[in-house]
Amino acid sequence: MLNKTQLIQLLEQEVEDFIQSQADKVISFEDDPMEYILNKYPSLDGTLDDLLTPSYRDYITGIYVMAPKPTTFKILLHNGQHFYLIYAKDSYIAKISGKKYYLLNIGEEEYAIKSIAELLTLGTPPGSQGPDVEEENITDASKETEEDGISSEDEGGDDEELAETKEVEVKKVEKPIRTLPLKFKILKESVEIKKPLLRFRILKENNFNALSFFDLAKRGGFRFQILADKIKNGSAFELVGGNSTPLKFINPDHADIFSNGDSNEIKKLSTTNINSFNFFKDDAGKEYSIKDLQKNSDFGGRGQGSGTIVEDYNLKLLKDQISLLKEENNGQPINVTVGNQTYNNIIDAESQKGSPKSDFNLIDIKGNPVVFISHKKAGGKGASANDFIRWSGYTMYKDHPEVKAFNVALSKWINENNIGEGLPNKSRFISRIEDKELIQKLIYGPKYGESFSKDNVNIILQGKIDLKPKGNNTYELTSQHDEIPPSIPKGEYYPYLTSAYRADREMFGIKNNEAIVMTKFQSNASSNVYELQNGKFVKVK
């Protein structure tokens, strides 16, 4: 007779065999239309995962394939509401309640998630158990926002993966009744009622989706750098199917191309479907493609209990560099220069709690933060002024003469144009900031001029962070683009006051108004731009 341990081992093996047999089964369109579509287009699966959490299947009942090129999907929600996902270059465009959101843009993805949540509140609840933990949006709207309802100029284009099917009929894809168990639970109860229940639970779940090129390319392509760094450092990759192994590039020249994060250049390396092309191999010579890798937390995946990405990539990069340099220095702290100032005995970097100006800080041997860093993202082709949306808000400077003049002129424009309450959609009102001290407080922090702190940063870094050796165990803190006080950003980085439509905001007593400071480039990126000239707003775009 089998004992308890043997029984558990036997059942575990049966479960494992069953799951493997199901994994090996080829899903046909007739058997499971929705799963067939999701397996055929892994970037669609990943996008729904981002927008609705890994529990998204509880909230959708069908998919319509609406057009082959640009590949367009209609997502039918459980309550009869729907939205569209349109494949575009490097990303999807979500069309929700008539508004378009370019999901490569962090701010627009934030709004898309909120808009879908609003659709889900209409009608009958889905009866879902919900995600395993409460889910917030990954993005921080307080740091990266954009006006509501932006219409993307990119209406979609060639899709090497999605557009390869030349003839796609418009089909309604209904969600079939799921018969395969997601979890296996084994309960063994004692015959004697007085004794506590003896329970055994076996869970076999694939918590992460397969990785896709789209997952790596979005948000400026910084995850290509993560992948290249893992290979360089000999870190193991989690594979679809449950195994893990270190990998290396089949072609060593590809390492630098992935590190640069340029999705267009990486696409050129593939002679077949980009997700199926074998870029990697293990020590035994077995080859792997992007889709053979799991989309775990390193690449933005959110498996059971993982929530969001554990650590911001650039902070992790900085921490790893400090750790490596300390190791090379026999475990001793390092010295770091910022501008003309040197900070001794640096041992680590840590995230700054709350929402001050500093994003993360360098820590000295006493555990004190001594260098305060504001970080801005950069795109895959290097740092530029169009890679981030905002420098800061400016409501705390409402009594400053330039801010007052801006809002007086804005209120006057609204009254003279009889547009009703608040700002019009798809419009932005801008003004170049002239007061240098105001600029310094806006970009370096409200306590500019005082001692460096979380509200008065030592440096603004954009993109990939580096510690460049200067000799004598001293390293210069730098990035792809730096601003060090008291410098004023130049060219397209120059700060502008802006106001733009956002339905859920009211600032300076003006409805539908989101007031933030943007770079010159971003301030002019709206469909309709009005610039303050001689006390009046004049349309310049």
Image: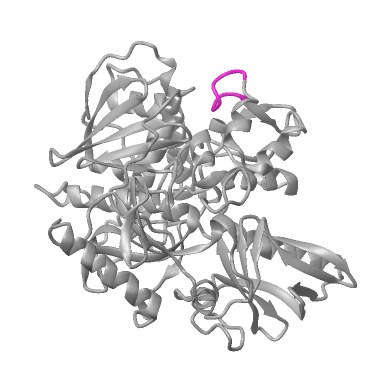
Of 6 and 64, the residue lying toward us: 64
Majority secondary structure in the magenta region: loop
Residue 344 rendering spot, x and y as whole percentages: 78, 81
Left or right for 112, reference 213: left
Q: Which residues are magenta?
A: 271-277
In the rendered image, which quarter is residue 281 located in?
top right
Where 176 falls versus 193 (above or below)? Answer: above
Residue 480 rendering spot, x and y as whole percentages: 67, 55
**Could one spot residue 169 in this view of the protein?**
yes
Of 390 and 400, the residue lying toward us: 400
Left or right for 410, reference 247: left
Spot the residue most to the left. 123
Magenta segment: does it hold 272?
Answer: yes
Residue 77 rendering spot, x and y as whole percentages: 19, 39
Of 541 and 51, the residue lying toward us: 541
Residue lying at 76% horizontally and 73% vertically, measured from the top left: 336
Spot the residue most to the front. 534
**Could one spot residue 32 in this view of the protein?**
no
In the rendered image, which quarter is residue 162 located in?
top left
Residue 369 rendering spot, x and y as whole percentages: 63, 81
Residue lying at 31% horizontally and 33% vertically, measured from the top left: 180
In the rendered image, which quarter is residue 141 located in?
bottom left
Spot the residue most to the right. 472
Left or right for 237, reference 78: right
